[in-house]
Amino acid sequence: MKKKLLALLLACCMVIGLLSSCGKKDSNTGDDQPSTPSSSGEQTPSSDPNAGPEKVSLTIWTPSEDQNPELGAWVVTMCDKFNEEHPEWDITFDYGVCSESDAKKLVTQDVDKAADVFLFGSTGLETLCQANALTEWGGTYKQFVEENYPASLVDTLNFDGGLYGVPITTDTYFMYYDKSVFSEDDAKSLDAMLEKGKVAFPLANGYYLAAFYLANGCTFFGPNGQDRAAGIDLGGDKGVAVTNLLVDLVANPNFIVAEPSDAIGMMREGNCDAYVCGTWQATQTQEILGENYGVAPLPSVMIDGANSQIRPFTSAKAVGVKSTTKYPEVSLNLAMYLAGYEGQKLHYELRGYVPCENQLINEVKDDPTCRADSETVSGIAVARGSFTEMSFYWTPAESMGVELRDGAVTHDNAAEKTEAFNAAANTSGVS
């Protein structure tokens, strides 16, 4: 059904009329356009039945693993299937290697020479848009993405009011735990867990430290991460209350400050019963815990007398289309196909990529790791913004976490340390 819906969607409107490059807000993004070939490969009424297939040449950039035959060559497989399903086009694909994190650097070096379709991390969105490198998605296409992918991920792909990609997987974190130590109810409360076993949390890493401040109403560029003028708000009574909580947590012998790579080693040795990480350590953790493998969204914690949900950042890995592509119609169809139901299903089967397309999320809910990830993204996660000012935060956050871990932050100086942290997080450090 979803595949048919996508086919109907792509038959609704002409891609060129829906798209504009980053920052060009005056372009037409309406839906009153001629039809275009559907994703099922069927010809629409506007196609010329006597015309042969249009010859198209597309360059595709993905991480090397997605092209590796030993790992199933995900992108090659999907592009070949796409070509077969679209007889109206005779597509030649040229593949290049570029990780999602490197896309913001490699694409912007020379947009015209970059790939037509590429994977990128949403945290690099502003850099890509400042270079006018991405095509904006509008009209029915935008509506389809907004309706069929988690809102927190779609938010990460919005810049200055425009949508610039389709989520293909998530990038967030949750909690792994030993079910022989903690029950499912225990795993909902950090306070309950600390009464029964040892829990590791990487406070000295700003990516994770932020979750406690987000739990108590602190914000990064406003409530939805789109308000640059709001800046990073970690101060005031709400921020001080979190700092005081963290002072108490560090003093608790059952709370361990450790990076995920260290925490999993501690778990293997029996010195840690739960830790925080993303999907990248799921397989190793399952091997360690066996039938006692537990995974859940981050728990709640008592902050200043109130039970508050710890809230992690989330971002997206996404498929984007180059703003200067010679084949916007084909490129957009391909991007939707790669990030759609079929593409995400194969990505999950071949490489364990957690799906973020709503129908597929429901189909893999029996996989506990996918379930914890999707519940996190859809329920408690906060979209991590792409504003370049976010770079100001990381060094002060690391310093704050280290000082907490080492006991340099106390109840006596919590207010002072919190305000200094907040000020530094909003300052470039360059005079």
Image (tube, rainbow, N blue to C red):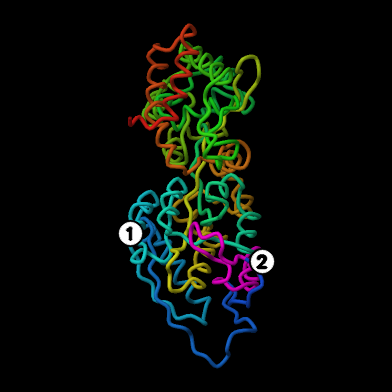
Residue at (47, 38) in percent of width and height: 278
* Mark 2: secondary structure: helix
Say what amino acid the circle numbered 2 marks.
Leu
Q: Does the magenta stretch include residue 23?
A: yes
Q: In which quarter of the image is residue 195?
A: top right
Relative placement, left or right, of 265 versus 138 is: left
Residue 132's place in the image compared with 277, above or below, is below
Residue at the disc numbered 1: 97
Q: In which quarter of the image is the C terminus?
A: top left
Residue at the disc numbered 2: 5
Query: Which of the pair 367/250 is nearer the observer?
Result: 250
Q: In which quarter of the image is the N terminus?
A: bottom right
Gap between marks 1 and 2, in whole Å? 32 Å
The range drawn in magenta is: 1-29
Say what amino acid the circle numbered 1 marks.
Val
In the rendered image, residue 294, in percent from the top left (x then y), is placed at 54, 33
Query: Which of the pair 146/267 is nearer the observer?
Result: 146
Query: Which of the pair 45/414 is nearer the observer?
Result: 414
Q: Is residue 313 magenta?
A: no
Residue at (34, 60) in percent of width and height: 68
Circle on res. 395: none
Residue at the far top: name it: 412
Would residue 64 be visible to someone looking at this image?
A: no
* Mark 1: secondary structure: strand
User: How busy is the neighbourhood of tag 1: few (under 14 within 10 Å), some, or many (20 plus)?
Assistant: some
Would residue 386 be visible to someone looking at this image?
A: yes
In the rendered image, residue 424, in percent from the top left (x then y), is placed at 41, 25
In the rendered image, residue 392, in percent from the top left (x then y), is placed at 40, 33
Residue 49's place in the image compared with 131, above or below, is below
Q: Could you tell which of marks 1 and 2 lies nearer the N-terminus?
A: 2
